[in-house]
């Protein structure tokens, strides 16, 4: 019976691998440090994100944009930053180790983490150690509230530059309610093992019910799925003319390909995770023609700030920055604005900096590339307007309301 | 008609699983090790054919042999460098090494080619329309299923009719005795890795042609599914891997279509557990009694 024992042992190994995969795990947590030129008077700004592994496209976007922003800020008058990016591979445990490494380095302000799961793991430490963290992209409510179920017990020192997930679900339901010309029968395909996607999905479904939207099909997939034909076929068979995709752009691109294969042509509608679909290498952008999405950032915007950022990013890293990058860029500038206004200097204690930052963020107004006249609530939630963007002739075009 | 359409897409998916599972199963049958890096060989195959088409600009038909060649060499190199020194080590050490190789390949790919997703070019667009347009089957699915059957037949012939195949069977029964009979066991294991990895490249091309995303962890999930398929069918058995792969694909698709898209994985693995409870060696696995 040696044979079957071995097979069972192998299964256990598969399960172990599966668990690692679920936590977006990669190899061992090697920390990569890229501090900017050490400046004695620079404020130590740290964050952790997936710089390697599955989700590294987000972590690297944040790192690249933050480096550009820090370089710009350091060339201006006012505060200087020294940046330290740690790799957490989007894994909660590694994020805590990364946080400890940052604290050992002497971090004074932070951009928390890039992803939500990691952000939820470290947010309590920020509260406990009284460190200010402004996350560019960890959008779950669990990042700012200790009791995310009831939106209660905010951490108080953790703020967000991005929308919360439920916020996007509500905004999407509102938009579809108002714009019935896009379609009235809605199908949803979401990723059931992802906080971001289920967060939007749950609020969207609740709002859709409350607002009387007609959701005719509702299907899920998980990270390990490669085949989406069943989900797309179900949406098509239900006669849906809107396909709501509260997911990231990689699986969305597969769904677009599959829908095209099946000859199904609804109006596709996504949230900020859809941003990036046009820069997928070798993607047939005609498939995304007419796709709507709600996003705070559009790389084609004509304002000076966005143009400058997009040009610099393209020059340095050879790709169009996505919304993660834009949020990170705004984070650095918002921190600079707050530090300058409060007169924060590098020799202040972390606790003093934190209280100065909290009072600034809850009172100031910030204009960035992901929105204008942004304000923050005491719980750390940002208030800015999502913009509807539609893809026309292979570029994002802002939709007038 | 919906039923047939689900069945065919299930068979298409299952065929890819089956080709990957063949690689797992052959290596297990002969080297008695679980090569967890097999899924990552698929990923390398996908990148090679992707770059052959987009950067070198060669046609699809040329990119496939290129991917097969690179993967075959990669498989043999990995075997030579990582597994051969551990031939006498415990199976656990070899398993951990395989997981290490898997991460090495994933992170290597990420360093070399970046972590962003690339979209595989469209191969063989179009579909056959049956029953007056009620059912459409894409050419790609047909090619995938036919390729899988062809590979399976060729492998069976190879194993049963050729001298090398005979030597492989001898190695899988008893390596010590095979050595005494003058068979170069190391060479046979190397050939097995070469064939398994070559198959991985073919699976990679079919997988990416159907689901056109190329990224560094592309191989891990299909690899794990295919490993499940190999266990399901009876690991070490070639027809078992084939049957297990097809069944897994069909069960997965039906579970999604008729029960729940949320629970499809749970259903697939529940079926696996039931099969293993009833038949611990898998559907077509042989029971090997311990010699005392």
Image (cartoon, helix red, strand yellow):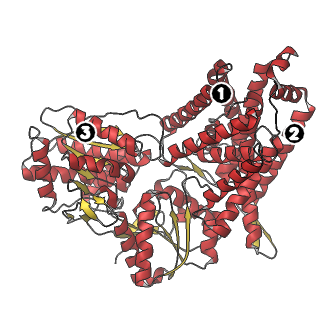
Which sits in the foreground, A14 or A132?
A: A14
Q: Earlier in the sequence, mark 1 or mark 2?
A: 1
Q: What element does badge 3 sit on?
A: strand
Total numbered badges shown on the rendered structure: 3
Res B156 label: 2
Res B91 label: 1
Specify the quadrant that holds the N terminus of chain B: bottom right
Specify the subunit that label 2 lies on.
B
Question: Crowding at label 2, few (<14), some or many (≥20) Cα neighbours within 10 Å?
Answer: some
Labels 3, 2: front one: 2
Specify the subunit that label 1 lies on.
B
Left or right of B207 in this view: A224:
left
Q: Are marks 1 and 2 in contact (CB under 8 Å)?
A: no
Which sits in the foreground, B284 or B183?
A: B284
Q: Is residue A358 above or below residue A172?
A: above
Query: Looking at the image, which residue sits at the far front?
Result: B292
Question: Crowding at label 1, few (<14), some or many (≥20) Cα neighbours within 10 Å?
Answer: some
Task: Give the residue pinned by disc 3.
Answer: A83
The verdict on a common chain for dots 1 and 2 is yes
- Residue B132: where, in percent of width, then height? 80, 76
Which sits in the foreground, B49 or A154?
A: A154
Left or right of B275 in this view: A67:
left
């Amino acid at each position: 019976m040696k044979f079957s024992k071995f097979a069972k042992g192998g299964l256990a190994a598969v399960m172990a691998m599966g668990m690692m995969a679920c936590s977006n795990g990669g190899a061992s947590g090697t920390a990569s440090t890229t501090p900017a030129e050490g400046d004695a008077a620079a404020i130590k700004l740290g964050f952790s994100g997936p710089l390697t592994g599955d989700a590294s496209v987000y972590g690297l976007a944040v790192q690249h944009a933050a480096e550009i922003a820090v370089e710009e800020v350091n060339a201006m008058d006012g505060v200087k930053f020294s940046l330290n990016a740690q790799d957490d591979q989007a894994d909660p445990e590694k994020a805590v180790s990364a946080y400890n490494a940052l604290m050992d380095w002497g971090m004074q302000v932070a951009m928390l983490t890039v992803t939500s799961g990691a952000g939820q793991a470290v947010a309590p430490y920020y509260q406990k150690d009284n460190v200010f963290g402004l996350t560019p992209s960890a959008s779950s409510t669990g990042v700012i509230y200790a009791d995310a179920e009831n939106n209660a017990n905010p951490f108080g020192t953790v703020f967000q530059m991005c929308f919360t997930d439920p916020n996007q679900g509500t905004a999407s339901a509102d938009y579809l309610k108002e714009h019935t010309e896009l379609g009235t029968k809605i199908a949803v395909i979401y990723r059931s093992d992802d906080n971001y996607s289920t967060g939007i999905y749950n609020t969207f479904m609740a709002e859709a019910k409350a607002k009387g939207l007609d959701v005719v099909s509702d299907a899920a997939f998980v990270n390990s799925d490669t085949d989406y034909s069943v989900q797309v076929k179900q949406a098509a068979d239900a006669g849906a003319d809107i396909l709501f995709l509260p997911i990231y752009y990689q699986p969305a691109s597969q769904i677009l390909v599959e829908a095209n294969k099946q000859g199904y042509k609804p109006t596709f509608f996504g949230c900020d995770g859809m941003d990036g679909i046009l820069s997928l290498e070798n993607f047939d952008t005609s498939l995304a023609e007419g796709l709507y999405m709600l996003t705070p950032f559009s790389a084609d915007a004509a304002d000076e700030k966005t143009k400058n950022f997009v040009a610099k990013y393209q020059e340095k890293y050879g790709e169009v920055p996505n919304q993660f990058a834009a949020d990170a860029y705004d984070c650095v500038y918002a921190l600079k604005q707050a530090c300058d206004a409060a007169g924060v200097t590098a020799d202040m204690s972390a606790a003093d900096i934190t209280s100065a930052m909290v009072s600034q963020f809850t009172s100031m107004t910030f204009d960035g590339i992901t929105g204008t006249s942004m304000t923050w609530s005491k719980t750390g939630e940002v208030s800015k307007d999502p913009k509807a963007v539609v893809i026309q002739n292979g570029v994002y075009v802002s939709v007038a309301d | 008609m919906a039923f047939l359409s689900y069945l065919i897409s299930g068979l298409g998916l299952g065929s890819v699983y089956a080709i990957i599972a063949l690689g797992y199963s052959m290596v297990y049958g002969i080297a008695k090790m679980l090569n967890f890096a097999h899924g990552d060989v698929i990923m390398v195959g996908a990148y090679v054919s992707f770059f052959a088409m987009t950067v070198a600009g060669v046609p699809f038909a040329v990119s496939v042999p290129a991917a097969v060649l690179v993967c075959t060499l990669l498989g043999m190199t990995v075997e030579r460098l990582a597994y051969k020194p551990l031939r006498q080590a415990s199976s656990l050490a070899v398993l951990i090494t395989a997981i290490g190789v898997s991460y090495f390949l994933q992170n290597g790919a990420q360093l070399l080619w970046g972590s962003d997703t690339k979209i595989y070019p469209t191969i063989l667009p179009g579909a056959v329309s049956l029953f007056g347009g009620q059912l459409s089957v894409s050419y790609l699915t047909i090619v995938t299923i036919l390729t899988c059957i062809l590979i399976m037949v060729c492998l069976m012939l190879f194993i049963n009719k050729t001298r090398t195949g005979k030597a492989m069977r001898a190695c899988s029964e008893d390596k010590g005795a095979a050595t005494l009979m003058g068979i170069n066991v190391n060479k046979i294991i190397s050939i097995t890795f070469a064939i398994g990895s070559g198959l991985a490249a073919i699976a990679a091309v079919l997988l990416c042609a159907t689901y056109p995303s190329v990224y560094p962890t592309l191989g891990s999930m299909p690899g794990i599914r295919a490993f499940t398929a190999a266990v399901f069918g009876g690991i070490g058995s070639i027809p078992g891997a084939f049957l297990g792969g097809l069944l897994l694909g069909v069960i997965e698709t039906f579970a999604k279509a008729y029960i729940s898209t949320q629970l499809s994985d749970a259903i697939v693995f529940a079926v696996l557990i039931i099969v293993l409870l009833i038949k611990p060696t898998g559907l077509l696995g042989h029971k090997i009694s311990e010699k005392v």
